[in-house]
Amino acid sequence: MALQRPACALEFKYIQQLVCSSQEAKKFAYCPYSHFPVGAALLTRSGKIFSGCNIENACYPLGICAERTAIQKAVSEGYKDFRAIAVASDLQDDFISPCGACRQVMREFGTDWDVYLTKADGTYIVRTVQELLPASFGPADLQKVQ
């Protein structure tokens, strides 16, 4: 089902599982303001999957995206080494793409892991965190200050 750049790092069964898990997580989205449900599924290096959905708030800045929900769930349970994340929405004609804040949070945990951007029908393209956030700022940059 990949439309561009085949995933080299993940077996197809993991990709399918991630895409399906992200679509399932989307069903739990709380989005009464945007009416734009998003789901995410995050695969750790050890093979565990954490899912997340977007959760909006009447005080708009306090909402959280699906990708950050999944990452925060994983980190809160001791996982910080990730292989891939899949993101799902109801977009029919375009691949869903993480917002800038989510890209920066992903970057916190490395640049060499995959992000599966999907359409509602389950088709996807894959990019690395590095491709989505080139010339990024990360933890090592804090060490450069003398």
Image: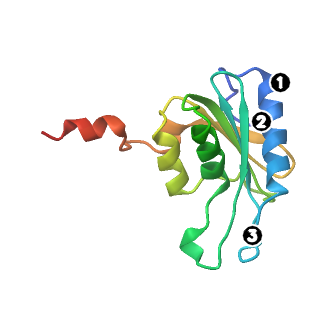
Crowd around label 2: few <14 · some 14–19 · many ≥20 (10 Å): many
Instruction: Count all numbered tags in the image, as a single digit.
Output: 3
Query: Which label is found at residue 18?
Result: 2
The mark closer to the camera, 3 or 2, is: 3
Label 1 is placed on what type of residue?
Lys
**SS under mark 1:** helix
Residue occupying image coordinates x 59% and y 31%: 79
Crowd around label 1: few <14 · some 14–19 · many ≥20 (10 Å): few
Residue occupying image coordinates x 73% and y 33%: 49
Label 2 is placed on what type of residue?
Leu
Relative to residue 36, is residue 134 depicted above or below? above
Residue linked to disc 1: 13
Relative side of 126 to 16, left or right: left
Q: Residue 98 location, x and y as percent? A: 60, 52
Cα–Cα gap, marks 1 and 3: 30 Å
The mark closer to the camera, 1 or 3, is: 3
User: Dots 3 and 2: beta carbons under 8 Å?
Assistant: no
Instruction: Give the image quarter of residue 128.
Output: top right
Q: Residue 83 location, x and y as percent? A: 62, 28
Instruction: Give the image quarter of residue 84.
Output: top right
